Amino acid sequence: MIKCPKCKKISEMTVWDVIDVTDAPEMKQKIRNDEAFRWHCSECEDNSLIFFPTIYHQPGEKYIVSYVPGDPDTAEKCMKDLNNDNESGYNFDNGYTRRVVTDMNQLREKLVILDEGLDDRIIELMKLFIVADIQTSSQDLRITEIYFTKEKDDTYSFAIRFDNDKWGGTAFSKENYDQVAKTFKTSLLADNEVIIDTEWAVEMLNKNM
């Protein structure tokens, strides 16, 4: 129950402990366009984004992600608890991709990557090379955020935010992706981490140097 800051009426918002798109197929799009996290006032139609912890499960792709805003330890614990819960009915041991995220932008990015049939580990490794290239050529710019995106013309790129709050971008081809995948193929086969981010990518790069 949420009290509207504008008209003061109390309205309901549904929060999901687990979103399984087999049981609730409409949530597949709603979590991608933020509607799953948007509260609407029933009186004045004011609305706000309210991000709550949830586990998103897409059984057809054997994909599950635990999202806990700002709390990686709790997000990872939620994933472990679900995997160890014999009463849940889930079995994530057979080829499942399991991920943990703590930021809505990370969650969106993971789902875009999933929709494109790509591997987020390869994307994170590519980011390292992109950042290194940019900082070598433009030493006065510092990158604060970088995200995989799919453009309207179906090409791929990275959206890049700099420390001056300006955004830029750089395109890449599937051939670039495939080359990185080939280079790290053996190491990725042995990897079972659930937090795939910059820190993970640096460790993976160091192992292969």
Image (cartoon, rainbow, N blue to C red):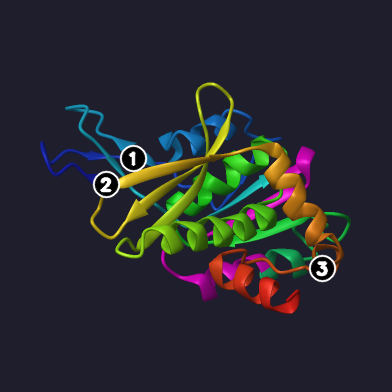
CB of mark 1 within 8 Å of CB of mark 3? no
44 falls in the magenta region: no
The nearer-to-camera label among 1 and 3 is: 3
Q: CA distance from mark 1 to mark 3?
A: 47 Å
User: Which residue is tagged 1?
Assistant: 12
Q: Answer above or below: position of 21 versus 190.
A: above
User: Which residue is tagged 2?
Assistant: 2
CB of mark 2 within 8 Å of CB of mark 3? no
Q: What label sits on residue 109 in the rendered view?
A: none
In the image, taking residue 3 as reference, residue 107 lies left or right, namely right
Dot 1 amino acid type: Glu
In the image, taking residue 62 as reference, residue 26 lies left or right, namely left
For the residue carrying disc 1, how many other residues have a C-alpha within 10 Å: few (<14), some (14-19), or many (20+)? Answer: few
Give residue 119's position: percent from left, percent from top: 71, 49
Give residue 13's position: percent from left, percent from top: 37, 41
Dot 3 amino acid type: Ser
Q: CA distance from mark 1 to mark 2?
A: 6 Å
User: Which residue is tagged 3?
Assistant: 187
Magenta residues span: 58-79
Give residue 40's position: percent from left, percent from top: 29, 33
Q: Please tell me which of labels 1 and 2 falls first in the chain.
A: 2
Residue 48 picture quarter: top left
> Foreground: 80 or 161?
161
Dot 2 amino acid type: Ile
